[in-house]
């Protein structure tokens, strides 16, 4: 059987990085086995739907270099691939379960359910629907429908025995049937619930592997019971532990955790994000940490997915992203940095050559595009302040003479080039008898206000002769 995986996000906004990790795992499983990767949009909860979200999903997957074999924009033979367009299909299968006695009409109102919840709270037990409507006769059901009473269709759960979920990561997990609620399959508005639509769609789309969060493992027993009721073969389940935020809680946009587009817009590279996320909860067979997509496809083994939660660490992401930045050519580097420079600083009097030079010297100093704004502040302010450790360093008695000689060398430069500036520094070294830290550090502090940075000749070149002489004169 051909391996087929699906990524089935809800169109509720930017893609959460936890969801993206799931997509990565599903994509790698499919491509590792020469299979298909399907995109399905789960929009059965119309109240949470966000305009344009589907476009964001496509944009994200495209940026991550995922080839979608089937989806809303490139339909195969098992479409449509948007659940709201499959509404009539779900009713057909819900009624099939009713006919088999595996589901039933439920006419309970919100008031009825609230009362049941209140009683459960008073008894200090978990609320489970008591199944009262499962005992209605055919005549009673017809009468209620004819009276126009609203209803849902619920799955009829066994109340005794166990259901076993076979999982690739956690093995055989035995679930007590008595804890399973008679879940709603079809809502009163005719839309299916998430759980029911998933089972129907996964079967009809011939999905072979399903990745879910570990927190839903118990609920997967309900999936298995649906598959059994229909007489269908269940897919291979792979439950993954959740990704925690830096504060140790579940990742949440509400808590300010970054989405993929947040990271991308800040100048993180998609290939670096993918590389980082795949290592959250999965480990390769070697100590390798930096992978191309081709290497990930070759190396990925879902049996090496961890049972333990992993923690999102922006420092590790920055480290990884910096390695990818170092490999960029100047045009790609400008793409992730220039928009942030333009947003913060006035570049109207800067030439393209100057901007390229500025960006290029920080290539090895930034871990993401937006970081260049803070790094380059010294090139855009008229005055600098020398404080703290830098000011303390400047107290050495040899420094005034070094700076005096260097100022004279700068004044004698007619052709303002990096090479001539380097020559001026070297000449200062000889004439002032200064070397190493006692040569470079005083000059850097005096002209830039900081103790460390990119190559000194490039820094001086970009600041310009007039600025350098003004700062050396103060």
Image (tube, rainbow, N blue to C red):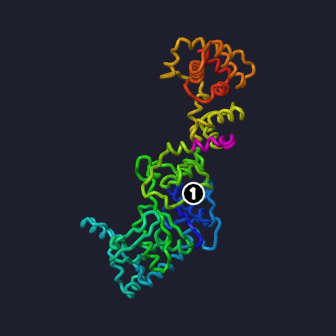
Residue 181 on the magenta segment: no
Residue occupying image coordinates x 45% and y 72%? 223
* Magenta span includes 332: yes
The x, y position of residue 355, in whole percent, is 68, 34
Query: Quadrant location of the C terminus?
Result: top right
Residue at (60% x, 73% y) in the render: 78
Compared to residue 29, the image places residue 351 above or below, namely above
**Percent x, y for residue 401?**
59, 11
Q: Residues within 10 Å of mark 1 (few under 14, many from 20)?
A: some
Element type at marker 1? helix
Query: In the displayed structure, would residue 233 be above or below residue 412?
Result: below
Q: Residue furthest left?
A: 123
Q: How many marks?
A: 1
Image side of residue 417 versus residue 126, left or right: right
The quarter of the picture where residue 372 lies is top right
Left or right side of 462 for 107: left
Outermost residue to the right? 415
Residue 337 visible in the snapshot? yes
Residue 428 picture location, percent across and down: 65, 15
| Magenta stretch bounds | 321-334
Query: Which residue carries the number 1 mark?
Result: 299
Along the horizontal axis of the image, is 246 left or right of 335? left
């Amino acid at each position: 059987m051909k391996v087929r995986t699906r990524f089935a996000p809800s169109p509720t906004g930017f893609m959460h990085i936890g969801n993206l990790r799931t997509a990565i795992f599903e994509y790698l499983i499919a491509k590792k086995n020469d299979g298909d990767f399907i995109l399905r949009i789960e929009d059965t909860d119309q109240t949470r739907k966000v305009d344009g979200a589907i476009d964001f999903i496509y944009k994200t997957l495209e940026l991550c270099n995922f080839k979608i074999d089937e989806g809303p924009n490139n339909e195969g033979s098992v479409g449509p691939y948007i659940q709201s367009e499959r509404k009539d299909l779900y009713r057909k299968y819900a009624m099939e379960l009713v006919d088999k006695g595996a589901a039933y009409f439920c006419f309970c109102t919100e008031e009825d359910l609230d009362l049941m919840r209140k009683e459960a709270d008073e008894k200090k037990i978990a609320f489970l629907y008591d199944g009262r409507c499962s005992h209605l006769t055919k005549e009673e059901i017809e009468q209620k429908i004819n009276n126009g009473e609203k209803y849902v269709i619920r799955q009829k759960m066994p109340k005794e025995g166990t259901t076993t979920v076979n999982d690739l990561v956690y093995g055989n997990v035995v679930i007590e049937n008595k804890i399973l609620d008679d879940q709603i399959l079809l809502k009163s508005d005719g839309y299916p619930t998430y759980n029911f639509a998933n089972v129907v769609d996964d079967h009809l789309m011939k999905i072979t592997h399903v990745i879910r969060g570990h927190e839903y493992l118990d609920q997967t027993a309900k999936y298995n019971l649906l598959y059994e009721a229909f007489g269908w073969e269940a897919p291979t389940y792979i439950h993954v532990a959740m990704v925690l935020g830096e504060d140790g809680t579940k990742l949440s946009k509400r808590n300010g955790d970054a989405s993929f587009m947040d990271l991308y817009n800040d100048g993180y590279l998609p290939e670096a994000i993918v590389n980082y996320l795949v290592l959250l909860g999965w480990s390769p067979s070697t100590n390798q940490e930096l992978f191309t997509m081709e290497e990930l496809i070759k190396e990925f083994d879902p049996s090496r997915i961890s049972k333990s939660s992993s923690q999102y660490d922006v420092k590790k992401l920055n480290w990884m992203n910096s390695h990818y930045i170092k490999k960029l050519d100047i045009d790609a580097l400008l793409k992730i940095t220039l928009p942030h420079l333009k947003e913060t600083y006035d570049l109207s009097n800067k030439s393209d050559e100057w901007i390229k030079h500025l960006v290029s010297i920080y290539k090895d100093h930034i871990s993401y595009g937006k970081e260049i704004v803070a790094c380059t502040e010294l090139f855009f302010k008229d005055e600098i302040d020398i404080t703290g450790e830098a000011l303390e360093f400047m107290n050495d008695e040899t420094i005034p003479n070094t700076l005096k000689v260097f100022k004279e060398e700068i004044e004698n430069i007619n052709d303002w080039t990096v090479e001539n500036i380097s020559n001026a520094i070297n000449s200062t070294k000889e004439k002032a008898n200064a070397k190493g830290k006692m040569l470079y550090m005083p000059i850097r502090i005096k002209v830039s206000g900081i103790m460390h940075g990119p190559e000194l000749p490039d820094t001086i070149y970009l600041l310009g002769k007039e600025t350098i002489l003004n700062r050396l004169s103060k």
